[in-house]
């Protein structure tokens, strides 16, 4: 993998830019040790992105096991216990292993280049933030080989079911600790970099929106991840050290776990979504050849979403039996989120309005994001209303809703970002025809999987069941077929990226006519190993 | 505003009625189940209203987007304008959604308040979630029973995928349904024995988590006589998908008859248990096998081999072949931190004695020992 990476052959990169006494920076180990010891933001960004792609395939494989079992009523392939392990690990791996590291990868590559900084503020910490991840992932995978297997409790790890699990549960808890540490260290690094290393003239309100969304996301992470660490630690002590935080028999309360978990869990939704908004806010203006509409209102809307995300957590818990005032408060607060989210969607559409649009793959994925994420927003509106949510809570409607937000939101925008920046990273163009195929197949299969799941949820199919009543068969079959198509399509993506790295045509400095951030205007393609060692001065 | 809502709901209702008629014939459903209680109706109407609002926003936003995609593309020679700010527009599209939200929150609030009003019920039923069945207790009537999945195991397991070989209500059928009278306010109190479950009947608009150590409540009033089916909605371990809920709504007279019948059966069953009866090994084993397949088989399996790593084997186990007192202790008091429940609250002396005797003499276990109901009675003290 590393052999294939073009950043290695950065012959012209060595000398470029560092016409001072910084030349010795370019002397670094090669081969495997290069990646273990690297403190270069581009190398670390690359590591994050490949790691997240491997996790994406792993979690995707688990999803296919789930969909294969649900192809027909009856138990054919796995037993219910293993089915629960699959749903749990699919969720944890996709959220913590695939989506979050993918956007940290983008942050590593792009933030220094976009603000005119030489690297991340804490370069060694950056290395450590990444290298915690493979250990965490190993713990997660290892839990399958423990007696009793991986935990089958759902990615939310609700107590007291967690108390019944085997040692795999403990490995998962430690994995979550490591993942949390990695995220917090990464976030501190990002905040420090953005606040301290901007080039002269790069005021906060001139930063590309991607940098803004990451600044806000990093604060969310620093605030939310310790809360999750607390929740799983309490689970650990309830399991082994006789505490009863979540056990009524000892004066605790199982619902307390849910409050703590979702106090982390709801900001987590925006931790995933905000960087995705950032990527799309770079891509749409570039291919509309028109500045982003309402830049300032985008910044304010992002901040508003971040703040509101801390006061809506209990909307995941409408059925636990809250007092009526509690339900009303959380419903009103939740519906409020629709306002800043709406502002963002309107701004993106207004950016496209009267532009000069072209539809290269990054733009296709960005428009796909805009369409599907808004659909997810619509179903979010439906679910925000307590009476309807009580009917749909823990059904496939919710599964459909959050996959529209996570897959269509985060994954589509990650694809948009990869296609958008791949030329800058590798110095080569990807195959546009194949990219378009990748988009259209992904779009069609995604809707085939998840659109019909709305119907399943409305009709009353609970989530996390390995077998279902006969009336749900048709939609489940369609959904399963879609899932296999979707999975195969992502292998096409792998092929496109490898083909680009090895055989792609040479890319110009600015392959996208409308792109205007520093990495396009100030840096050659491919971006040299060290960039902005002398900071640019912006007027 | 209200009149407008009524009009919209009426229009939506007409569509929905024709839609529902279709949905009843065609197998795959597109919408919520036909509502059968006032709350379920309110939820249904609220959902329909929201869908119309969403449709409006959809057309507006994606209509604009579609126009831009078709007309403002470079390939048709459109030149980009460079505007990027308009405070008036920003204010409008902040305020208008806010007003729409208030319009949505108003009917939702009314329904929430109605849903939470569990006062003055005609009947109160306590539903207790167990791994993996429901226990019911009619608090005033003194009727209580357990509801297990009634779908035969061989329709679930194996490679039998043909729907024709499965019961019509596959996975939605139980041995003992909850029976309630039509048109009466039924309050459901939920709690759980082990982990969190959720009691859910979609057509009645009821879903309430059942939380161990805590009591929660909800209510419904069924419009019509009929059988309404639901499932546990909160992941509760291995057989989460196999603990359905069936509510039979009947005429009040029939309900009274049912209650009387239940009481009679309970008294007869109690009378049939002769405390002085001397049980033979064979009788206890036969009875024990029945108890085992109703209560133990989900985890410990028919082979007694359990599921390695998750549920321990009983065949050849130290507990089932060793000290009788220890065996009785774990069956009666359960094991904390595992799915093993304290069965002394669920089973009577005879059944506990029978199942222990069965376990000590089944599979590879050949202790030749038996535990009598009198032993269990003594152990209860």
Image (spheres, coloured by chain):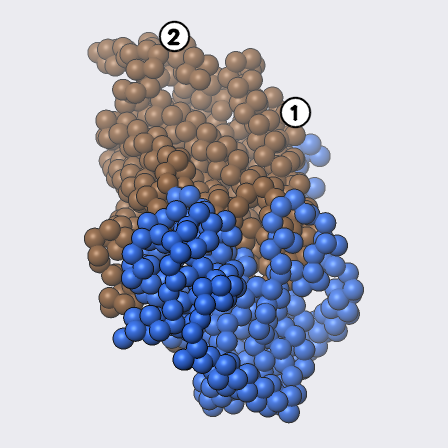
Chain colours: A brown, B blue
The residue under the point 62% across, 37% down is A484
**Separation (CA) of disc 2 from disc 1:** 30 Å
Percent position of residue B266, x then y: 51, 83
Q: Relative to B366, is B53 on the left or the right? A: right
Q: Look at mark 1 in the image and give the residue it sits on.
A: A433
Question: Which image quarter: residue B276?
Answer: bottom left
User: Can residue A464 be seen here?
Assistant: no
Q: Relative to A121, is A106 on the left or the right? A: right
Percent position of residue A441, x then y: 65, 35
Q: Relative to B65, is A112 on the left or the right? A: left
Percent position of residue B369, x then y: 37, 59
The residue under the point 52% across, 13% down is A502
Q: Relative to B305, is B325 on the left or the right? A: left
Question: Which image quarter: residue A14?
Answer: top left
Q: Is residue A43 above or below residue A182?
A: above
Does dot 1 land on a helix, a strand or a loop?
A: helix
The residue under the point 78% across, 64% down is B25
Percent position of residue A249, x then y: 27, 67
Label of residue A490 in the image: none
Labels 2 and 1 share a subunit: yes
Asked if the residue at tag 1 contacts the one at tag 2, i.e. Cβ–Cβ closer than 8 Å, the answer is no
Precedes in sequence: disc 2 or disc 1 = 2
């Amino acid at each position: 993998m590393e052999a294939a990476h073009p950043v290695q052959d950065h012959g012209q990169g060595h000398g470029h830019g560092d016409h001072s006494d910084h030349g010795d920076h370019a002397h670094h180990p090669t081969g495997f040790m290069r990646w273990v010891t690297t403190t270069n933001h581009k190398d670390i960004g690359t590591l994050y992105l490949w790691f997240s792609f491997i996790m994406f395939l792993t979690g995707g494989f688990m999803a296919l096991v789930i969909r294969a079992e649900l192809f027909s009523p009856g138990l054919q392939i796995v037993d219910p216990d293993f089915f629960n392990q699959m749903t749990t690990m699919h969720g944890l791996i996709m959220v913590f292993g695939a989506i979050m590291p993918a956007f940290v990868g983008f942050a590593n590559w792009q933030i220094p280049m976009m603000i005119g900084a030489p690297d991340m503020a804490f370069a060694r910490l950056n290395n450590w933030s990444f290298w915690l991840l493979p250990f965490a992932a190993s713990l997660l995978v290892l839990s399958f080989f423990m007696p009793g297997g991986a935990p089958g409790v759902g990615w939310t790890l609700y107590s007291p079911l967690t108390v019944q699990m085997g040692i795999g549960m403990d490995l998962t808890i430690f994995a979550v600790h490591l993942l949390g540490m990695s995220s917090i260290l990464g976030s501190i690094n990002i905040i420090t970099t953005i606040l301290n290393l901007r080039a002269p003239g790069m005021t906060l309100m001139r930063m590309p929106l991607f940098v803004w969304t990451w600044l806000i996301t990093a604060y969310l992470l620093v605030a939310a991840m310790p809360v999750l660490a607390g929740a799983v630690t309490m689970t650990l002590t309830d399991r082994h050290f006789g505490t009863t935080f979540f056990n009524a028999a000892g004066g605790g309360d199982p619902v307390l776990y849910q409050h703590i978990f979702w106090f982390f869990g709801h900001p987590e939704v925006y931790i995933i979504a905000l960087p995705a908004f950032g990527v799309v806010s770079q891509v749409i203006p570039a291919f509309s050849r028109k500045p982003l509409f309402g830049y300032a209102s985008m910044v304010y809307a992002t901040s508003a979403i971040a703040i509101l995300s801390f006061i809506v957590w209990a909307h995941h818990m409408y059925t636990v039996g809250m007092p009526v005032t509690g339900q009303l408060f959380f419903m009103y607060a939740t519906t409020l989120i629709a306002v800043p989210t709406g502002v963002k969607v309107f701004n993106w559409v207004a950016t496209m309005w009267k532009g000069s649009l072209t539809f290269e793959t990054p733009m296709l994925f960005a428009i796909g994001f805009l369409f599907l994420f808004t659909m997810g927003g619509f179903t979010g509106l439906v679910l925000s209303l307590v009476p309807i949510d009580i009917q749909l809570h823990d059904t496939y409607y919710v599964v459909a809703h959050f996959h529209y937000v996570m897959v269509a939101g985060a994954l589509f925008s990650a694809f948009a970002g990869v296609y958008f920046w791949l030329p800058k990273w590798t110095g080569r163009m990807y195959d546009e025809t194949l990219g378009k195929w990748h988009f259209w197949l992904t779009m069609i299969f995604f809707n085939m999987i998840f659109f019909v799941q709305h119907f399943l949820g409305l009709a009353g199919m609970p989530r996390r069941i390995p077998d279902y009543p006969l009336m749900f068969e048709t939609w489940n079959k369609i959904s399963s077929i879609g899932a296999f198509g979707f999975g195969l399509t992502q292998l096409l993506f792998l092929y496109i990226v490898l083909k680009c790295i090895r055989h792609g045509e040479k890319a110009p400095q600015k392959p996208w006519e409308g792109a205007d951030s520093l990495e396009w205007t100030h840096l050659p393609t491919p971006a040299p190993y060290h960039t902005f060692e002398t900071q640019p001065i912006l007027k | 505003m209200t009149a407008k809502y009524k009009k919209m709901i009426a229009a939506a209702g007409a569509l929905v009625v024709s839609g529902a008629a279709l949905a009843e014939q065609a197998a795959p459903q597109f919408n919520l189940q036909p509502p059968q209680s006032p709350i379920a109706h309110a939820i249904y109407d609220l959902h329909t209203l929201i869908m119309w609002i969403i449709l409006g926003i959809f057309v507006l936003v994606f209509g604009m987007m579609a126009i831009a995609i078709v007309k403002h593309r470079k390939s048709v020679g459109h030149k980009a304008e460079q505007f990027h700010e308009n405070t008036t527009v920003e204010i409008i599209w902040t305020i208008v959604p806010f007003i729409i939200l208030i319009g949505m929150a108003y009917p939702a609030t009314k329904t929430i308040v109605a849903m939470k009003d569990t006062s003055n019920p005609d009947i109160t039923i306590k539903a207790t979630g167990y791994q993996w069945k429901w226990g019911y207790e009619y608090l005033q009537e003194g009727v209580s029973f357990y509801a297990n999945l009634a779908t035969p195991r061989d329709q679930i397991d194996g490679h039998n995928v043909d729907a024709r070989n499965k019961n019509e209500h596959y996975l939605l059928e139980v041995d003992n349904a909850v029976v309630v009278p039509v048109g009466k306010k039924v309050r459901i109190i939920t709690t759980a024995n082990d982990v969190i479950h959720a009691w859910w009947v979609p057509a009645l608009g009821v879903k309430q988590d059942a939380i161990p150590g805590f009591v929660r409540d909800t209510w419904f009033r069924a419009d019509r006589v009929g059988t309404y089916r639901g499932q546990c909605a909160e992941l509760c371990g291995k057989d989460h998908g196999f603990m359905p809920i069936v509510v039979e709504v009947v005429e009040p007279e029939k309900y009274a008859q049912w209650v009387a019948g239940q009481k009679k059966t309970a008294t007869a069953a109690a009378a049939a248990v002769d405390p002085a009866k001397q049980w033979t090994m064979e009788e206890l084993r036969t009875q024990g096998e029945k108890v085992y397949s109703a209560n133990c088989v989900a985890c410990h399996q028919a082979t007694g081999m359990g599921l390695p790593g998750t549920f321990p084997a009983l065949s050849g186990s130290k507990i089932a072949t060793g000290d009788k007192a220890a065996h009785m202790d774990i069956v009666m008091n359960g094991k904390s931190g595992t799915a093993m429940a304290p069965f002394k609250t669920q089973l009577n002396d005879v059944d506990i004695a029978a199942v222990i005797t069965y376990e000590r003499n089944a599979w590879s276990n050949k202790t030749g020992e038996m535990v009598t109901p009198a032993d269990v009675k003594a152990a209860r003290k």
